[in-house]
Amino acid sequence: MSVIRWTARIMGLLIIAFVVVLAVGEGRDLDVTALGGIEGTMFLAWLMALIGMAVLWKWEGAGGILTLSGMAAFYVLNFAASGRFPGGPVFPACFLPGVLALICWWRDRRLHNDEHSRAM
C-alpha cells in the first residue's frame, strides 16, 4: 500500500509544482482577479483540486475527496462553457492522486476495522 500512497503524494506534488512553474512563468500577466463568471469558478474548482493534492499528504480521505470534487467540478464547468471536456493528458492525470489517496484511505480504514473486530 505504501507504493500507492507515495505515488499519490508524488503525483500530486508534481502537478502542484507544474502549476506553480506555469504561474511564475506568467508573472505579472497572471491576473486571476480579472477572471469572471464561469472562468473564475473554474479557477476555484482547479484550486480546490490542487489544495486537495496538498491535503492528501496528511489526510488521505479528505485530500482525495477535495481533489476529485475539484476536478469533477472543473470538468463539468468546462463542459458547460465549451460543450466539451478538457483535452490532453494533464487534466485526466489530475484525477489519479485523488483516486489513489482514497484507495489508501479505504484500505487503511478497512484494516483498522478488521483489527478492531478481532480484538473484541
Image: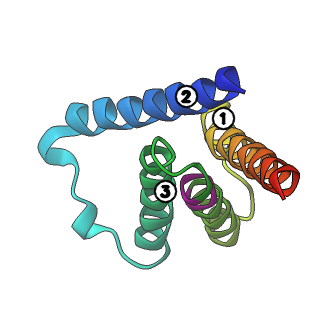
Pointer 1 or 2: first along the chain: 2
Question: In the rendered view, does 106 fall on the left or right side of 3?
Answer: right
Q: Which residue is mark 1?
A: 93
The residue shown at (57%, 25%) is: 6
Q: Amino acid at mark 2?
A: Met
Residue 64 location (% of width, % of height): 62, 52
Quarter-wise, where is residue 91 in the image? top right
Q: Residue at x 33, y 68 (%)?
A: 35
Of the pair 115 and 28, the residue shown nearer to us: 115
Instruction: From the top left corner, tell me how far across and down residue 84 is, in percent.
Output: 74, 57
Rendered-image quadrant of the N terminus? top right
Q: State which tag comes first along the sequence, 3 or 2.
A: 2
The segment highlighted magenta reads 62-66
Q: CA distance from mark 3 to mark 1?
A: 13 Å
The local secondary structure at tag 3 comes to helix
Decide if residue 114 is on the left or right side of residue 84. Answer: right
Query: Which disc is residue 46 wearing?
Result: 3
Viewer-closest of 98 and 110: 110
Queried whether the magenta region covers residue 4, the answer comes back as no
**Dot 1 and dot 2 residues touching (CB under 8 Å):** yes
Q: Quadrant of residue 39?
A: bottom left
Image marks 3 and 2: residues in contact by CB distance under 8 Å: no
Examine the rendered structure and indicate whether residue 54 appears above or below residue 33: above
- Secondary structure under the numbered disc 2 in the rendered image: helix
**Residue type marked 1:** Ala
The residue sitting at 66% across, 35% down in the picture is: 93
Horizontal and vertical percent position of residue 113: 80, 55
Amino acid type assigned to the residue bearing label 3 in the image = Trp
* On-image quarter of the C terminus: bottom right
Which residue in the protein does label 2 denote? 11
Please say whether residue 63 is one of the residues in the magenta stretch. yes
Mark 1 is surrounded, within 10 Å at the Cα level, by few (under 14), some (14 to 19) or many (20 or more) other residues, namely few
